[in-house]
Image: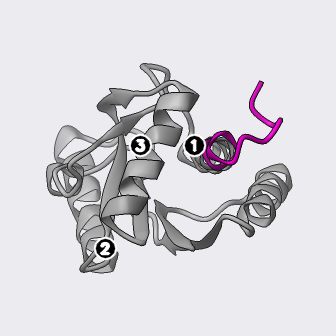
Amino acid sequence: MMTVNIICVGKLKERYLKDGCAEYIKRLSPFAKVNIIELQEERCGDEPSDAQIKSVVEKEGERITARLPKSGVTIPLCIEGREFSSPEFSSLLEKTSLESSSVTFVIGGSFGLSEKVKNSGKTKLSFGRLTLPHQLARLVLLEQIYRAFSISANSKYHK
């Protein structure tokens, strides 16, 4: 059974996000063991300077890097990443499962990921050019992982 780690900056605050994530983690249980690793979000003022933003991204990047597994496949989520259709994403996870028994997805904070974290993965994933709150990105990612496993299992979930 594959292990899916999701390293994410910040905690879920809204009940609907917590409930949605819990539902997809439950649905994933026949396919994979899912670990959610929440890291502290770095704070800064309402109108941060470029230097403050860079500092936030680097500090969060250090926390993320410290939690990346020594083995397995890492897939950071960033706007510069590749967009996949759901069947293509399913194929990516199938190929990943042949390489390793674990995959780690990384979701940054409000200002994104450091270059070091982005470069930690051979493949980078993008949900498109839209900006999503990082908490919502976690829910979308869990749903897409579930959809990918459902496609591989030929279930009726993906239509």
Q: Which sits in the foreground, 111 or 53?
A: 111
Residue 44 visible in the picture: no
Percent across and percent down for residue 26 are 80, 65
Picture quarter containing residue 104? bottom left
**Looking at this view, is 49 or 79 the one in front?**
79
The answer to whether residue 50 of the structure is visible from this angle is yes
Kindly identify the amino acid type of the residue bearing the numbered disc 1.
Answer: Ala
Residue at image coords 51%, 73%: 37
Amino acid at pointer 3: Leu
In the figure, 62 relative to 76: above or below?
Answer: below
Residue 154 belongs to magenta span: yes
User: Residues under labels 2 and 3: Cα distance?
Assistant: 20 Å
N-term mark: 3 or 1: 3
Q: Start and end of the magenta stretch?
A: 148-159
Circle on res. 137: 1
**Contact, mark 2 vs mark 1 (Cβ under 8 Å):** no
Circle 3 residue: 92
Residues at marks 3 and 1, CA–CA distance in whole angstroms: 19 Å
Residue at x 34%, y 78% (from the top left corner): 67
Q: Amino acid at mark 2?
A: Leu
Q: Residue at x 84, y 50 (%)?
A: 16
Label 2 vs 3, first from the N-terminus: 2
Which residue is drawn at the image coordinates 37% and 55% (left, top)?
A: 96
Q: Quadrant of the C terminus?
A: top right
Compute the Cα span from label 2 to label 1.
19 Å
Q: Which residue is mark 2?
A: 68
